[in-house]
Structures are given as C-alpha cells and as structure tokens.
C-alpha cells in the first residue's frame, strides 16, 4: 500500500479539521496483476482463518487460472467453484488518481461507486453461472480503504438486490492495526436487520491515525490528522480500517 507525504493542515470540514495523512502499516505487493491477486488471496484466507472463518470450504489450495478465465478455481466441499478478484477502487469518480481522493468521503457516494464496479463484473457473467462464482473485493491503497458504513451499505445491497455471486467478501491487506476481512454476502451484520439505508448513506468517513490521540487546551480531541469537536463524539465511531465516521448511530 502506498503512503502519502505529510501535508499542511487543511480547513475545517464539518466536525473535522484535516492535517497530516494517517499512518497505515505498509505492505509490499508484487508488480504483476496475477501475482498481486495471488498474494491478496493468500493473505485474505489467512486473515479470515484467524477470525474463525472458512469462506469457501476449501479442500485444497486455490488454482490460479490463465488470463481468459476466472481468476481462481476452488476445490470445495461442494465441488469445483470459481473466484474472481476485483480492486474496489472507483478512481473514475476521483479524477483517476489516488492523489485526488479526498480525506473525507461520503459513505453513500463511495458505496454506490464500488457497487457500480461490481455490477459491471456481474454483467460479464450473465448466462455462464453453471457453477458458483465468488467475488473478493480488495484495496491496495489506504486512501480508498472501505469504511465500515460503506461495507454495511454494500452488504445491504447484496442482500436485497439481484446478482449472481455465491459470496462477496472484502479484504483490506493493511489496516491501522491488522489486516481486515469482511464477508459482505451472505452477511451476519445485525445492522442489516433494521437498516435505514438513507441514514447510512448520509454518513461521512474521515481517515485518521488512532495511534496519536491527544487533546488541545480548548477541549478538541486530536486523532492524528483529525481534530474533533468533543460535542460530536457521541455521534462518531472509530474503526480499525483507519476511519472515524460521523452520523447518527444506534445507541
């Protein structure tokens, strides 16, 4: 995952004031697409296993396929299945560059942009669903790591809208503390049972550095590059993905 240089503080945006960029644990990925996907899948499966998940019920290691095929063939307890990987990076919405991705993101806009990419991939497979096809979303640059509310919104859409994937998961190889694996479909997230879609879509997420927490003399809490008014803390939550989210959350 790439990292940016520090910048001078920017102006206050809503409840947050932006300063330097957040700190993520840096990882080194290969340069070739096939090698990146192999590394992502291996790390993702290891992370899922650490959290007690066995997403594909594999009987042996996945087999990587040639370019004009699904990315991997899975030998599972249910038979032969397929897996495709997709980077969840809708850069077309941010000027085509990670450098242009803002530090504060609207949850609904980012979720819709990622879901649009998924629908395009889904459309490619119409008529060839003879065997289950799994989708693994991943992030290679911390500037577009998916905040929790984006994952919640995506999971809601995968549950309620038509698509052909047997499972959809998201893997963040290098979060603030550790890698993060999330099964988006099917999902056991209790928030999905009573979700207010419009409310979730209105949340905002700012990248933060939770390793540097302090408080200014005026009572403002400082989380690395983000300055937070204490009056807003009751409506904010921190996440291991490297974000602080603002909105109305269940109590």
Image (spheres, rainbow, N blue to C red):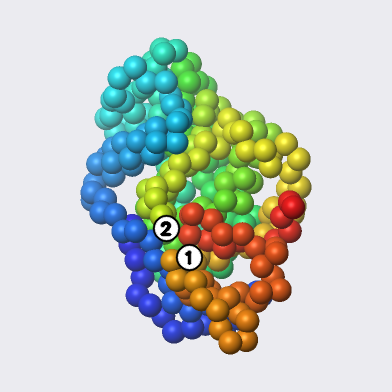
Q: Which residue is mark 1?
A: 210
Q: Are marks 1 and 2 in contact (CB under 8 Å)?
A: yes
- C-alpha gap between disc 1 and disc 2: 8 Å
Looking at the picture, how far across and down is residue 168, in whole percent?
51, 34
Q: Find numbered disc 1 in the image and state the secondary structure of the residue it sits on.
A: loop
User: In the displayed structure, does residue 123 sit left or right of residue 34?
Assistant: right
Which numbered disc flags the more N-terminal residue, 1 or 2?
Answer: 2
Which image quarter: residue 239? bottom right
Picture layout, residue 106 above or below residue 48:
below
Residue at point 57% right, 51% down? 148
**Image quadrant containing the N terminus:** bottom left
Picture layout, residue 161 above or below residue 1:
above
Looking at the picture, how far across and down is residue 146, in whole percent?
51, 53
Picture layout, residue 167 above or below residue 132:
below
Q: Which residue is mark 2?
A: 176
> In front here: 69 or 105?
105
Which image quarter: residue 34? top left
Residue at point 55% right, 79% down? 215
Label 2 Cα neighbours within 10 Å, binned few <14 / some 14-19 / many ≥20: many
Residue at point 30% right, 19% down? 60
Q: Find numbered disc 2 in the image and state the secondary structure of the residue it sits on.
A: loop
Picture layout, residue 199 above or below residue 133:
below
Q: Is residue 121 visible?
A: no
């Amino acid at each position: 995952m790439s990292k940016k240089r520090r910048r001078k503080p920017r102006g206050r945006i809503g409840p947050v004031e932006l300063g330097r960029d957040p700190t993520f644990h840096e990882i080194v990925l290969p340069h070739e697409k096939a090698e990146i996907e192999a590394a992502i899948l291996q790390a993702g499966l290891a992370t899922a296993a650490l959290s007690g998940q066995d997403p594909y019920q594999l009987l042996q290691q996945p087999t990587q396929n040639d370019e004009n095929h699904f990315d991997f063939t899975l030998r599972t307890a249910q038979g032969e299945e397929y897996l495709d990987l997709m980077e969840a990076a809708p850069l077309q919405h941010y000027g085509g560059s990670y450098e242009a991705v803002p530090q504060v993101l609207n949850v609904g806009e980012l979720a819709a942009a990622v879901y649009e990419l998924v629908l395009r991939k889904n459309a490619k497979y119409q008529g060839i669903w003879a065997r289950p096809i799994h989708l693994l979303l991943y992030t290679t640059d911390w500037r577009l790591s998916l905040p929790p509310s984006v994952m919640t919104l995506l999971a809601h859409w995968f549950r309620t809208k038509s698509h052909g994937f047997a499972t959809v998961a998201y893997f963040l190889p290098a979060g603030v503390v550790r890698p993060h694996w999330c099964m988006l479909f099917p999902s056991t997230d209790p928030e999905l049972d009573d979700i207010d879609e419009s409310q979730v879509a209105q949340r905002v997420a700012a990248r933060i550095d939770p390793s540097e927490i302090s408080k200014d003399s005026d009572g403002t809490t400082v989380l690395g590059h983000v300055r937070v008014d204490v009056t807003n803390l009751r409506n904010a939550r921190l996440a291991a993905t490297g974000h602080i989210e603002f909105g109305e959350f269940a109590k």
